[in-house]
Amino acid sequence: MKVFEFKASKAPKPGRDFWTLLETLKPETGVIASPVDQPYTYRQGVRVHAGVRSCIHALLSYYIL
């Protein structure tokens, strides 16, 4: 399972509900979709993906591959 949050900022700051979901659901990964230039690790278990397309690819690769 993955938890997603979408942000419009190039310096995304996940909301309190995002962290609550991570704590409650204990997913494999947390994913933040943001208009950044390159994907990066926000903190252990949480990745920032470069926009919605990259985020969709991460979701599809989880369920298809």
Image (cartoon, rainbow, N blue to C red):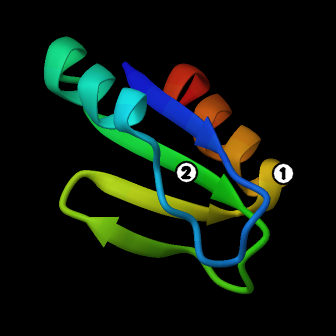
Please identify the residue farthest to the right as the structure is shown: 53
Task: Kindly check if marks 2 and 1 are in contact, taking CB atoms under 8 A apart as contact.
Answer: no
Residue located 57% across and 66% down the image: 12
Question: Is 26 located above or below residue 41 in the figure?
Answer: above
Binning the other alpha carbons within 10 Å of mark 2 as few (below 14), some (14 to 19) or many (20 upward) gives many
Q: Position of residue 58 (x, y in %)?
A: 60, 44
Residue 5, quarter of picture: top right
Q: Name the residue tied to disc 1.
A: 53
The structure residue drawn at horizontal position 66% and vertical position 30%, both measured from the top left corner, is 60
Give whichever of discs 2 and 1 has the lower sequence position.
Answer: 2
The answer for how far apart the CA atoms under marks 2 and 1 are is 12 Å
User: Nearest the camera: 8 or 61?
Assistant: 8
- Residue under numbered circle 2: 32
The extreme top residue here reads 25
The residue lying at 15 percent from left, 26 percent from top is 23
Q: Position of residue 18 (x, y in %)?
A: 40, 33
Image coords of residue 28 (percent x, y): 25, 32
Q: Quadrant of the N terminus?
A: top left
User: Which amino acid, by three-letter code, is at mark 2?
Assistant: Ile
